[in-house]
Amino acid sequence: MTLSPTSKLLFTLVLFGVAVALVAVASAVHEAAPLFFAWIPLLTVAWVLTRPESATPVGQTSPEEPRAEPDVAPTDPNEPPADPESTS
């Protein structure tokens, strides 16, 4: 199962919300039993964050990655190639 970065973030927020809600329930009912279940969503967060991210479609770059620039300078096709020994 692959997740997008946005899906990972939202799923993680929901899981933390569930864990906090279980702590709130434990506080409201003055019982410790809900605390024993609060670790389940917290362990699931680790599983969610280690899932591979979905690949970007071919031809599109993600906003985090800079666009790849060519390593060669543009040259005039009618100009002869530069002689490496004559560079100054």
Image (cartoon, rainbow, N blue to C red):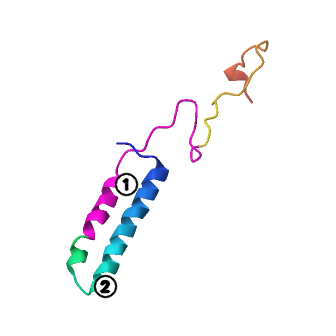
Q: Main secondary structure of the magenta part?
A: loop
Answer yes or no: do the residues labelled 1 and 2 have beta carbons within 8 Å? no
Span of residues in magenta: 38-65
> Considering depth in this image, is 11 or 68 the residue closer to the camera?
11
In the orientation shown, which residue stands out farthest toward the bottom?
30
Q: Position of residue 8 (x, y in %)?
A: 43, 53
User: Would you say 6 lies left or right of 70 here?
Assistant: left
Image quadrant of residue 79?
top right
Residue 65 lies, with reference to residue 70, above or below; the image says below
User: Would you say 3 lies left or right of 87 here?
Assistant: left
Q: Quadrant of the C terminus?
A: top right
Mark 1, residue position: 49
Q: Is residue 30 magenta?
A: no
Which residue: 52% across, 33% down? 57
Q: Position of residue 58 (x, y in %)?
A: 53, 30
**Three-letter code for the amino acid on which mark 2 is drawn:** Ser
Name the element at disc 2: helix
Name the element at disc 1: helix
Q: CA distance from mark 1 to mark 2?
A: 29 Å
Which residue: 26% across, 68% down? 39
Q: Residues within 10 Å of mark 1 (few under 14, many from 20)?
A: some
First along the sequence among labels 1 and 2: 2
Q: Residue 27 got which mark? A: 2
Q: Quadrant of the N terminus?
A: top left
